[in-house]
């Protein structure tokens, strides 16, 4: 009796109409488990644990309670002071761009009205309620968008589950969902922009999709200024694939969040230049009542002691290494090499977009030699985290191909598991 073996690329591994619903529910359960774990993580994570998020919380409280961007009164409260502040026209201000704080202040008003909780009195409960709204609900939405994107663009069942699991369990963006930061909204905005574009490939006249694509690309810029390279190049892809009418919808929508960033910055600072761009000036280095600012004599990693070659090494494969902490990103080199050499198509454009934006953003931060501090005391090279959705999209064709062989699946599991450990071992927040 002949025994037939099922080839690796058979329907048992391919996404078909028969198993699509099952895979859809499997992705939903993967997302739900990650969501529940993040809720537990949020409940167990101390609030105001870092100068980074305290800086933004101070602005949120000042806006709602005192109607000002000045944080003098808030920072004087025990446990609220932060080193991420500047001294401007006789007052203290957060050094962070104010748009995110303005948005969170709006959420705080709603939470305070509905629950009666106050950030000044019930700090932990109120902060966690706000973070649930601004971080965890968007995370769930991002999981749904990614699932739809994978079900439409990926052929292998194993690849769909692998990439959904990667986003939900294996990336260093996850520790940041339990704290107030700009990296999680920046990453989610990037994913939504990509989703609006890639899920509407056949709808060439869908102006609404291009409007939302532009809006989310612009919102990514408002959270991560180097994302301007992403937004501009993505606009080029929109024009190349959908024509001038789509670009005419994309560009104005992209400008809305960017204009909002500039206007809130003007309201806070009196100018369009963000406070953190004054690093090294009298706004950072000052002495009040005989007490010098932290930045007059920074300590530890903020001293930026490493030279350029050591810094590059630790950014790539060292203690903040992109590839050492999340080994799945090693596959990006194969995806770029394989994708960028193929005949010109939307898939190839996305590959070039990923490669070019990664190089531009990494190169940009290498030029900031005064800030060689790896993003401060954090578990990851945090200024690259918003690129994670773009990297996952880049990996889709290669993971699809690797999934057809047992050796490829084993390789990806070996790369995935260490990344999952690094993503979940910092249980109580990313500021370590």
Image (tube, rainbow, N blue to C red):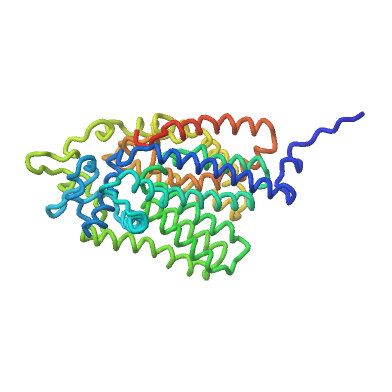
Residue nearest the observer in this picture, 147 or 293: 147
The front one of 122 and 190 is 122
- Find residue 305 and report its horizontal and vertical position in percent: 27, 31
The x and y percentages for residue 374 are 34, 36
- Quadrant hosting residue 407: top right
Q: Is residue 162 visible?
A: yes
Where does the C terminus fall, quadrant-wise? top left
Q: Is residue 181 above or below residue 255?
A: above
Q: Residue at x 52, y 55 (%)?
A: 194
Quarter of image, res 299: top left
Residue 342 x/y as whole percent:
62, 48
How many discs appear? Answer: 0
68 shown above or below 52: below
Q: Is residue 346 left or right of residue 48?
A: right
Q: Residue at x 57, y 43 (%)?
A: 164
Horizontal side of 186 relative to 86 (left or right) equals right
Tell which residue pokes out farthest to the left in this image: 289
Q: Could you say which is closer to the camera, residue 278 or residue 79?
A: 79
Quadrant housing the N terminus: top right
Q: Is residue 279 above or below residue 320?
A: below
Q: Position of residue 162 (x, y in %)?
A: 60, 39
């Amino acid at each position: 009796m002949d025994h037939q073996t099922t080839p690796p690329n058979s329907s048992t591994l391919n996404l078909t109409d028969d198993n699509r619903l099952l895979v859809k529910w499997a992705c939903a359960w993967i997302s739900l488990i990650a969501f529940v774990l993040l809720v537990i993580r949020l409940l167990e994570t101390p609030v105001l644990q870092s100068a980074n998020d305290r800086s933004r919380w101070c602005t949120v409280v000042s806006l709602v309670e005192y109607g000002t961007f000045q944080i003098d009164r808030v920072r004087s409260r025990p446990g609220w002071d932060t080193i991420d502040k500047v001294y401007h026209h006789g007052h203290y201000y957060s050094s962070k761009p104010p748009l995110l704080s303005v948005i969170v202040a709006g959420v705080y008003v709603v939470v305070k009205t509905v629950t009666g909780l106050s950030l000044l009195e019930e700090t932990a409960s109120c902060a966690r309620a706000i973070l649930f709204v601004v971080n965890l609900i968007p995370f769930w939405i991002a999981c749904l968008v990614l699932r739809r994107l994978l079900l439409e663009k990926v052929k292998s069942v194993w690849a769909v589950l692998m990439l959904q699991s990667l986003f939900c369990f294996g990336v260093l963006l996850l520790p940041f969902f339990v704290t107030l930061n700009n990296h999680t909204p920046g990453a989610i905005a990037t994913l939504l922009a990509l989703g609006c574009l890639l899920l509407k490939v056949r709808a060439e006249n869908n102006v609404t999709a291009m409007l939302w694509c532009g809006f989310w690309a612009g919102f990514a810029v408002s959270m991560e200024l180097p994302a301007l390279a992403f937004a501009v190049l993505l606009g080029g892809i929109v024009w190349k694939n959908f024509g001038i009418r789509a670009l005419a919808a994309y560009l104005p929508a992209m400008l809305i969040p960017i204009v909002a960033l500039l206007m809130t910055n003007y309201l806070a600072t009196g100018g369009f230049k963000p406070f953190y761009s004054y690093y090294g000036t009298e706004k950072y280095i000052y002495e009040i009542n005989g007490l010098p600012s932290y930045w007059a004599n920074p300590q530890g990693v903020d001293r930026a002691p490493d030279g350029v070659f050591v810094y590059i090494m630790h950014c790539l494969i060292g203690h903040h290494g992109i590839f050492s902490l999340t080994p799945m990103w090693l596959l990006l080199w194969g995806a770029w090499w394989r994708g960028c050499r193929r005949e010109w198509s939307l898939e190839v454009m996305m590959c070039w977009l990923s490669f070019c934006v990664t190089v531009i953003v990494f190169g940009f931060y290498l030029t900031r030699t005064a800030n060689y501090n790896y993003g401060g005391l954090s578990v990851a090279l945090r200024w690259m985290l918003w690129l994670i959705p773009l990297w996952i999209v880049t990996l889709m064709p290669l993971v699809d191909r690797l999934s057809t062989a047992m050796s490829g699946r084993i390789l990806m599991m070996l790369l995935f598991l260490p990344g999952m450990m690094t993503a979940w071992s910092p249980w109580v927040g990313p500021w370590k």
